[in-house]
Amino acid sequence: MFGRRFVLLVALLGATAWTAGCPMPHTFKGAPVIVQEKVVDLSYSFGPDTIYWPTGESFALQRTHFGRTPDGYWYASNNICMAEHGGTHMDAPIHFGEGKNTADQVPLSDCIGPAAVIDVRDKVAADRDYRLSVEDIAAWEGQHGRLPKGAIVVMYSGWGTRWGNKLAYLGTDKAGDVANLHFPGFSRQAAELLVAQREIAAIGVDTASIDHGPSHDFPVHRVINGANKPAFENVANVERLPPAGATLIALPMKIAGGSGGPTRIIALLP
């Protein structure tokens, strides 16, 4: 299955990433020229202002060397420390699925796929704790057809405009406070439909969690991770994606035994 998806990805790159002036002869000469406007960065930078789950350890960078060495050449090096679950990151299935894939075991076939972006901004404007519903999925399919096999279903709530402001983004700016979280996510029913009736690869959100803020038992995590599927949280720049047609590529840090990790996500536009 992944082999077919890789061929499709190569074909897409050939269709979208080569400029008209770059020939594709039988014998390849020269490097491909990427059309930058077709590549979207869906990741936030990691730094002192990166938003983490209130109980997680924030990102810290310790400079170990920054300057000229005694031999006269430039050298820079740092140590980093952070929780797995913060900033743009992956929830590996083991996060809420006993015996399921750890971060290093998640296949690339679950990290690369057609992006299905479901816009729920109008619903979220009336309810900041909104949960993407089965009806929202049906409405998307009514316009764009059945979710494609291997889709990565992304909720577009518009929450990215709040990034950088913990109080606005999470509902609280107090360390350890999980009682006052408020942001949208998926509903349990939508998650169940996606794993039972659609052959998805993963889901993603432009918020801090695939479960809505007030959740205390995390049913969406349990359904998605329990089906051995990963999830991507704090996805940036979702507003730059079309509802259908883009290809999403998520490359999580390959942490042996990890429950998740920082992830660089990009999309190739049609």
Image: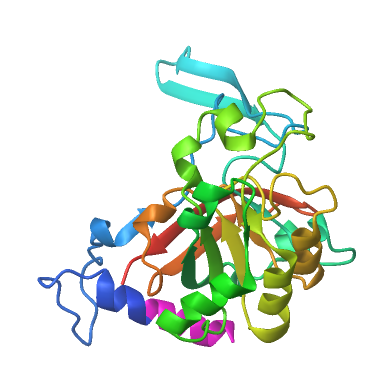
Does the rendering let one see residue 235? no
Q: Which residues are magenta?
A: 1-10
Between residue 98 and residue 107, name the one nearer to us. Answer: 98
Residue 103 lies, in percent from the top left, at 72, 58
| Spot occupied by residue 249 in the image (x, y as percentages of width and height) | 49, 64
Task: Say above or below: 67 vs 231.
Answer: above
Quarter of the image containing the C terminus? bottom left
* Residue 73 in sight in this render: yes
Q: Residue at x 67, y 28 (%)?
A: 172
Rendered position, 102 above or below 109: above
The percent coordinates of residue 202 (x first, y second) are 62, 68
Q: Nearer the viewer, residue 146 or 268?
A: 146
The single residue placed furthest to the front in the displayed view is 126
Quarter of the image for the N terminus: give it: bottom right
- Left or right: 220, with 30 as reference point: right
Note whether 260 is above or below 190 in the view shown: above
What is the magenta segment's predominant secondary structure?
A: helix
Q: Is residue 160 magenta?
A: no
Displayed quadrant of residue 230: bottom right
Which residue: 58% across, 67% down?
111
